[in-house]
Image (cartoon, rainbow, N blue to C red):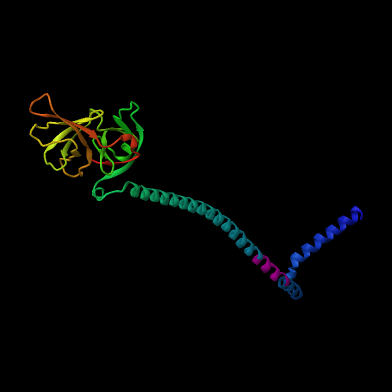
């Protein structure tokens, strides 16, 4: 096709389009019929396209929703597994505590007391058993003066409280002192610690005290039961003619203890 022919056809096409625009052939009946026929043919296609587009949008939205839900499910499964593990650990702790309670044979006298179970973590390296270190301190609300006992006997008294541990002086320590009574008697005495035996102070010569008598802790407020401190092993006339010299052997060997009770005073 030559350039002249191409330009001629282009000009005729432009002219024909302009004539059709001027004459508005869309008002001609057969043109309307053709237009309606074309619309009738293309309308289902357009509706189908719109429907497909809408469904595709819904599917895409549902897909992303499922992805988000799956991510949440993964997080929830991890959380549930963590909670199940924590529950198992709690059950194990409760089981261990139950075994411990049976092992140390808790008595009824503990039910009305405010106490905590602790563990001995360190002993006096000197060999004189003057003190022990127990687990728990300010973190557990322990205070100086709290009584430390087994289920029946006195282990010591808390002398110093740290962050997570406490220092307990034993009845073998000269700094240990407590109000006490002798079994079967109402009179109160003072027990002063010592190694290997402590002293029972202010025992009058007329007091009926003998070797083998048991010495018990005495709480002036009568809140804490009488825990055993030791047993009298020696009774002699003292340097003071009005008092006797009484020696008491502590009942508890601190090195044999692993779990103890701390009673808040």
Which range of residues does the magenta coloring cover? 41-51
Q: Residue 263 sits in which quadrant? A: top left
Residue 94: image x %, image y %? 38, 50
Q: Nearer the viewer, residue 177 or 73?
A: 177
Q: Position of residue 36 (x, y in %)?
A: 72, 73
Relative side of 100 to 243, left or right: right
Residue 159 visible: no
**19, 137: nearer the viewer:** 137
Looking at the image, can residue 148 be seen?
A: yes
Horizontally, residue 23 falls left or right of residue 246, namely right
Q: Is residue 5 above or below residue 148?
A: below
In-front residue for pair 181/236: 236
Q: Main structural element of the magenta stretch: helix, strand or loop?
A: helix
Q: Tell me which residue sits at (23%, 48%) in the image.
A: 109
Q: Is 80 above or below relative to 135?
A: below
Residue 118: give x, y in percent of width and height: 33, 41
Which residue is depicted at the point 50% across and 54% down? 76
């Amino acid at each position: 096709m030559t350039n002249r022919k191409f330009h001629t056809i282009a000009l005729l096409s432009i002219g024909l389009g302009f004539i059709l625009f001027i004459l508005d052939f869309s008002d001609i009946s057969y043109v309307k019929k053709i237009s309606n026929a074309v619309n009738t043919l293309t309308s289902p296609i357009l509706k189908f396209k719109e429907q497909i587009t809408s469904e595709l949008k819904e599917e895409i939205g549902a897909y992303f929703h499922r992805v988000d839900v799956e991510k949440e499910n993964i997080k929830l499964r991890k959380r549930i597994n963590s909670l199940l593990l924590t529950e198992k650990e709690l059950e194990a702790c409760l089981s261990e505590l139950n075994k411990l309670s049976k092992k140390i044979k808790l008595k009824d006298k503990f039910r009305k007391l405010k106490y905590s179970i602790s563990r001995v973590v360190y002993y006096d390296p000197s060999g004189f058993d003057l003190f022990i270190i127990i687990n728990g301190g300010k973190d557990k609300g322990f205070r100086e003066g709290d009584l430390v006992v087994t289920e029946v006997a006195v282990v010591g008294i808390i002398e110093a409280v740290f962050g997570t541990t406490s220092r307990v002086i034993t009845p073998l320590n000269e700094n240990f002192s407590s109000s006490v009574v002798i079994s079967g008697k109402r009179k109160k005495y003072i027990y002063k610690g010592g190694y290997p035996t402590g002293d029972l102070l202010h025992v009058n010569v007329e007091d009926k005290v003998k070797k083998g008598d048991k010495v018990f802790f005495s709480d002036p407020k009568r809140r804490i039961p009488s825990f055993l401190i030791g047993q009298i092993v020696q009774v002699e006339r003292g340097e003071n003619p009005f008092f006797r010299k009484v020696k008491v052997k502590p009942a508890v060997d601190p090195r044999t203890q692993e779990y103890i009770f701390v009673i808040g005073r």
